[in-house]
Image (cartoon, helix red, strand yellow):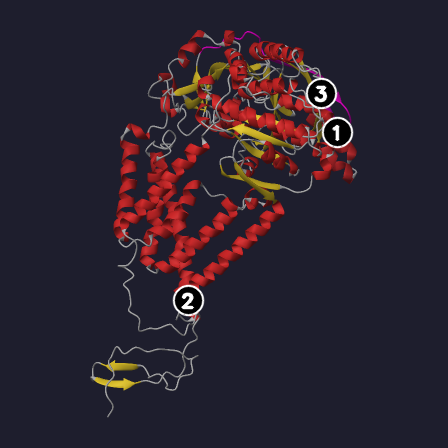
Amino acid sequence: MGSRAPVDAPFLAAPWAITPLAPPHPLSVDLDRGSVRQRMRLEEPERLFSNQHYDDTRPKQDVHRSGLPLYSVGLVFLTWFVLFWAEKTVSNNLPTPLKLQDKESHPGRFITEEAWSHLHHLTSFGPKPAGSYENEVLAVDYLTREINFIIQSANPRQRILFDVQKTTGGSDDGLNCAVMLEVLRVLSQSSTPLQHNVIFLFNGAEESPLKAAHGFITQHKWAKEIAAFINLEACGAGGKEILFQAGPNHPWLVKLYVESAPHPNALVLAEDIFQSDLIPSDTDFRVFRDFGNIPGLDFAHAMNGYVYHTKYDNMDAIPRGTVQHTGDNLLALVQRLASSTELSDPQQHAAGREVYFNIWPRTIVHYSEEAGVFLNILFIGLSIYTALVNARVIFAGETRKAALWQLTLGCGVVGAGWLHGILTNVMIALILDALNRSMTWYSRPGLIFGLYYCPTLVCMMALMAIYGNYKVVVLCSTHSKVWQCVDRELFMVTRGTVGRPGRLVEVGRGMAHGVPLIVLVKDRLKALGIISAIFLLTVAAATLTPLGFPYGADPSQPTPQRILTFHVKRTFYSAEGSVRLQDSGYFLFPLDRHSPDSVAQLIPEVSNARNVADDCDTELFCGLPVSSARMVSLLDSSSWIPADAPVIHIATSLELMTQTMLSVKVRRLTFRAKGPENMGLVVSVVPNVELVRWSFEADLPAQGIKWLDRSAYFIHYTSGSTGTAWDFWLDFECLIVAKSLVGKKTKAMVCKCRQMYQEPIIDIALSGHYFSDKRNKSPHFSEFLNKYPEWAHVTAWT
């Protein structure tokens, strides 16, 4: 009788090794009988990852007790914050502005103090909307005077021509206009002639929208000479200007910028986001690109967007280093472009697209789209390879079926954690909104960490803790992070030049970093508790203290709420031309989630405001005077406050001049409109009638705005002078005739169409917008506006 083997005797499975002795059969104990039985294993399952040094006799570790100490997570997060702060500090480092006394020691350089003087004069005129006296007279006169002075003092080897095109007037971009004047001065005094002409375009009406740029590129005598352009924009104040659009195609433009600019700053991801219509804005870049078929570069100042289009957007919000940074880059870029060989025949260099982004201040990585695709494929391949290597270690000794199941389950847990986190964030946002605490992060972005980052970490970690196999979780999390890096950060080709497969916010990127680390912590429950406590404390601070109020009026760092208010006098006419309704009041348009409720407790009139949703079911555009087509989607959330009629200096009128049948199916209506320098026209066509042509331009938009199941069109008119008659015509086609001609029932259908033309075929509305004339702001309207708190910036007109 042989000796008994211990119950826990190890069993080494090595079917691939040839050994002199066969391994012992596994033993099992029948506890009921106390006897030991041997069972022959007839077939060993195939193992996925094998290693002859694998040994089941090695001591087992308790995975629930091993891991990183808790403080290591805090150290890592602290390191991230320090690096973030350092990167932000370095990124915001601006060059030293040069003064007038630096001219002699810095010949040919951009002098900030010169540009600062121009900016001071331009901003002293106040707001300069298109059509205003400040824009059409004061700004134009100042630019004309300064440009003529530059011409007089120019180097004889430089030839400068000057022209004023009276389309919509002067300038509405003070900082960049000042920079352009100084760049023009420096170039004019250079003794080296440029190989190519340079046109400095000081245009306004960019907010009208984009009319001055369109007028220049389609009508000016110099427009056909342009081979490339540089557009200067602003959606904030201060900071470094950033290249956020380039092309289309023509990669040589980006290359010249990187080679020439002393402080390059660019991000191709911004181009993708901007052109995807996620941001409801536009620039003159689109006009030059689409109507001039010209490639170019689009730059913008994007720091401190809180002051954009508010009373705080003044010289105090602009560091002088920003002026020097922009001027240095623009001067160097213009000089490089004007001496480039590519500009002689840009079409020879048009092929291809460029990927570009900063990896550190003054350091830009750029490469072709093809190189980006190759690098993406390379890093994806490396990711797959390292995943297989790591999986070989993690699943060593496991069967192929068991390893595949664990990998699928682990990655499924990671995906479910992401979904759980997203749903939790949505729920938190809805709860905060129900408590009237939405946008709590607006003035204090740091609250995002506690309100949304922390609960997402908890949701993801909780599922991973339930699953328990942390090695698989880390494997899935880490390699999904690699793919995100390849796609978004390291090689932005998929974001900027290939497609738009979805976008990740910065918070999500941070969670992808944090989760693989935190699941390796030894005391995971304590880590979950700390993160949950941070979330609960942040919620308490946002809901129970003033920290959660989204707006602020601190002059050093204002975060105002934007309020848009119109003082309106409305007259509604019947089809016969008689007045059917006339009233007046304040039209409050919502610009954020809290408008107008944020001031309802402070202003009695606002607390009694009426929602206009019911009017939207019967009136064209709710019977409200819109100033932009972007307003249409939010009209049903607008409010109306009855009030005394405004003071109107120049009345707005619309007159039908003639009606002409151009054919049996086409009817032309000619109108004359009169009013202020800015007017809005809305046209809506009845069923079985279609707007086919108009006098505004050769082609109609692809489709109109859908309103009450009908097509509507909005046209914004801007003039450099007030009271000028605006004559236009519209052609309408009877669709019944157009369809019936095919069936040869022309006579009956023509009669039916003529009968239809006896009835109204359109609804038409005209509104006059008095942006700048203070005579149109009545005393009671001014009194109403003065009731708004300091933290509200009110944009108001009649």
Residue that numbered label 3 is attached to: 220
Q: Is residue 622 left or right of residue 740?
A: left
Disc 1 is placed on an element classified as: loop
Specify the amino acid type for callout 3. His
Please tell me the numbered disc located at residue 665: 1
**From the viewer's perspective, is 475 left or right of 658?**
left
The mark that comes first in sequence, 2 or 1, is 2
Tell me where residue 747 sits by quadrant: top right
Side of 444 relative to 294 (left or right): left
With respect to residue 83, does 481 lie above or below? below
| Between 713 and 748, the one nearer to me in the picture | 713
Front label number (2 vs 1): 2
Residue occupying the point 56% across, 33% down: 243
Q: Is residue 130 magenta?
A: no
Say which of marks 3 and 1 sits in front. 3
Residue at 65% across, 25% down: 761
Crowd around label 3: few <14 · some 14–19 · many ≥20 (10 Å): few
374 versus 105 height, above or below? below
Q: Classify the position of the N terminus by image quarter.
A: bottom left
Instruction: Give the residue pinned by disc 2.
Output: 403
